[in-house]
Amino acid sequence: MSAITRPGLAPSPTVPAPATVAGPVTQARVVRAEWTKLRALRSTWWCTLTAVVLIVGVGALIAESGTPYHVSPGNTAAAGASGALDGLLIAQLVMGVVGVLAFSGEYGTGMIRATLAVVPARLPVLWAKVIVLVGLVLPVTMVCAFADFFAAAAIESSRGGSVLSLTDPGVLRTVAGSSLYLTVVVVIGLALGALLRKTAAGLSVFAAVFFVIPVVVNVLPQNITGFAPYLPSNAGGALWGQGVTGAHALSPWTGFACLCGYAVVLTALAAWQLRRRDA
């Protein structure tokens, strides 16, 4: 626009149009946006710090305060490694909180409307949240699991217990499997947050599935608890030595596949609902 000149007045400055940078909505850009939102939340960092303390600190505390662990035919090295990772039983609740809040938090604040307005296809938002959470939880928990194992192994050795090594049968699978377990758990939490849309409801269902139901099943007569190995926590726990034992126990990788099946089904339901329901 050219400047307008009036008699006796200085020419008005030309105001340039605001610069607008636009581009197609791609999956990579949605992932970057979701990562920006996730790391901007204080709850993300507090939950991450809590998980680190629970995984590493509780394992070291158990090794320091318990009876020194001795490997024997009835006490394998893998079982000793699993015992050192008992902090994961509490850390999985933290992962559930992170997963549920990743979606339900946006519904609670109303930000989901802006998110879906920018990404009208909707499903890229869900995939981006899955990618971001897996990219955060997997490396952090993997480092914590190995740090916990080495710390607990050093403490056990100094107290006269058996020297545990990653080369012992089943130990590497137990340590790495604990991180894989928590990674799938956070995806299940995300799917519950997307399905239920309310933080209280999502956390209630998560706590019931991973904490309440397994405890209730343990006190029921064995003739009606044949489904116990297929509960999410028990199925996934088979990978890192915390599953159901006995004749009906699942093998480690079969149990983990069962847990992944729960995550896939819930995520598929969340995707179906996200496409059909209004924000």
Image (tube, rainbow, N blue to C red):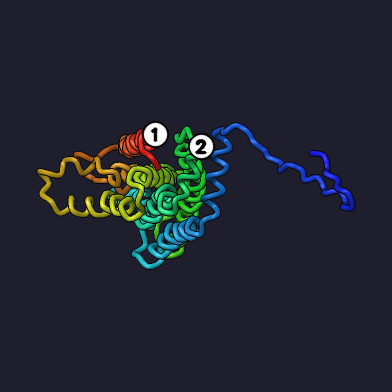
Total marks in image: 2
Q: Few, some or many C-alpha atoms within 10 Å of disc 2 (few <14, some 14-19, many ≥20)?
A: some
Residue receiving disc 1 = 275
Q: Position of residue 92 (x, y in %)?
A: 37, 53
**Of all residues shown, which one is farthest toward the front?**
7
Q: Position of residue 123 (x, y in %)?
A: 45, 34
* Residue drawn 54% across the image and 39% down it: 30
Residue 252 visible: no
Q: Secondary structure at mark 2?
A: loop
Question: For residue 184, which numbered disc appears in the image?
Answer: none
* Residue drawn 50% across the image and 45% down it: 114
The amino acid sitting under disc 1 is Arg
Please give left or right for residue 61 compared with residue 220 in the image: right
**Along the line of sight, which residue is nearer the eye, 93 or 156?**
93
* Residue drawn 13% across the image and 51% down it: 220
Residue receiving disc 2 = 119
Q: Few, some or many C-alpha atoms within 10 Å of disc 1 (few <14, some 14-19, many ≥20)?
A: few
Quadrant (top left, top right, bottom left, bottom right) of the C terminus: top left
